[in-house]
Structure formats: structure tokens, C-alpha cells
Amino acid sequence: MTRTAWLLPSVAIMLAITGCKKEEDNSSAPEAEPSTKPAAVPEEADETPTTSIIRPDITPEPMIDIPPPSLETTIGFPAGGNDLDDNALAELNRVLKSDQLARGWPVILWGHTDSTGRDEANLRVSEKRAQVVADYLIDHGVDEKRISVIPMGEQRQAEPNAKLDGTPDEAGRAANRRVELKVEAPDQDEGDTGSEAKVPDKNAEENTDSDSGA
């Protein structure tokens, strides 16, 4: 019997003993206890509806368009002239951009002169000045039917034409050479069909007739 043949049974026995020992070691290891910590629950989105600040039982009041007042301005002119200077053009351009003009309100132009010259001539000059202003507005889109031209001549002076010593007041005369412009707001009482028509007082008429003969 050879040495190798003798060793083989011994090796097989040692391997069998080693395998049994590993099984005992594995069986003796404590089993891991299941975790008692609850699993994380994903957060749910807040589905609470947003509360509106507008109460359904309250009806909002309608917006009221409050019109602006009438627009009034003065356009100056040089002595003996009907031309629009830079100041006059700047003022007319401001009128063209105004809310009053955009609303389609009527435009009234009063032409004036100083007291130099004859009354008839001043009346014609005042009409020409008012018409120059009217033509400028018409050329810039204002309907001609909205414009009224009223020549006043020298009848309504804004400033004195002469000083107390009798000498000419050049500053006053310059102020009188003008066109007064008004974009007139409509009467707030127009279209008020709820108001009652005024009935003439018969007694008042009789009293007037009786007094006129006194």
C-alpha cells in the first residue's frame, strides 16, 4: 500500500468534519429581527381649494365715467398779425391731446383785438384770428361742424388798452389780441327725461301784465 493511498481516506474525513462545523456555525448565528420602524409615507399635495376673496352674494358696483370739466385757454397774437407763433402752436397742440377734445365736445372760438383801429376793421381782424385757430384744429382732425367762430372785435377787453396817464398800455393791448378757446362740456342735465317740464305760472303772468302799465 502506497503512502498516497493511505492519505486519501484521512483527507476525506477531515473535509467532512470541516463541513459539519461550518453548518453548525451558520445554524448558531442569530437571525436578523424584522425592523419595526414604519416605512416613510410620501407627503400628499394639499388639495384644499383656494378661498376666493370675492363674495358671490355681493355684486360689484359699475365703474362711473366722470367727465372732466370744460377746457378753456387763450391763444395770443402779435400786433396787427394773424399768424400763430410758437407759443400759440404749443398751446393748440396741448388742446389737440386733451381728453375733452377726444370726447367730441364742441369747440367755441371767440376772436378779440385791442382798441387800435376802427370798430369795423377790428371786428374783421378778430374773425380772421379765430378762423386761423379753427383752420389749425381742422387740419389736425377736428370736425369742422364742432367748431363755432364768434368775432368780438374790441368789445370785450381782458386788460386796459391805455394807462391812467393816457399813454398806450402795450402789455394790456398784447393781452387783448387773443382768441379765447373753449372745449365745452355737455350740460349734465341734458337727457334727464325724469324731470318735469316747467309750467308757466298764470298768476305770475297776470301780475307782470298789471305791473307793466304802472
Image (cartoon, rainbow, N blue to C red):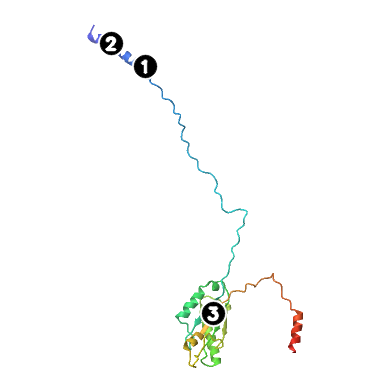
Quadrant location of residue 30?
top left
Q: CA distance from mark 2 to mark 1?
A: 22 Å
Residue plotted at (54% across, 77% down): 72
Front: mark 3 or 2: 3
> What amino acid is labelled 1 in the image?
Glu
Q: Residues within 10 Å of mark 2 (few under 14, many from 20)?
A: few
Number of other residues with Cα within 10 Å of mark 1, as a class: few under 14, some 14 to 19, many 20 or more: few
C-alpha distance separating marks 3 and 2: 134 Å
Labelled disc at residue 10: 2
Earlier residue among tags 3 and 2: 2
Which residue is depicted at the point 49% across and 77% down? 91
Q: Which residue is identified by label 3?
A: 181
Q: Amino acid at mark 2?
A: Ser
Residue lying at the far front of the rendered structure: 164
Image position of 100 with respect to 60: above or below: below
The x and y percentages for residue 181 are 54, 79
85 relative position to 102: left or right: left
Q: Residue furthest top?
A: 1
Q: For the residues marked 3 and 1, what is the alpha-carbon distance in whole angstroms?
A: 118 Å
Q: Quadrant of the C terminus?
A: bottom right
- Marked residue nearer the N-terminal end (2 or 1): 2
Q: Nearer the viewer, residue 173 or 192?
A: 173
Amino acid at pointer 3: Leu
Q: Which mark is residue 24?
A: 1
**Residue 171, horizontal then vertical, whole percent:** 47, 86
Report whether residue 131 is seen: no
Q: Secondary structure at mark 3?
A: strand
Q: Quick one: label 3, few (<14), some, or many (20+) residues within 10 Å?
A: many
Q: Secondary structure at mark 1?
A: helix
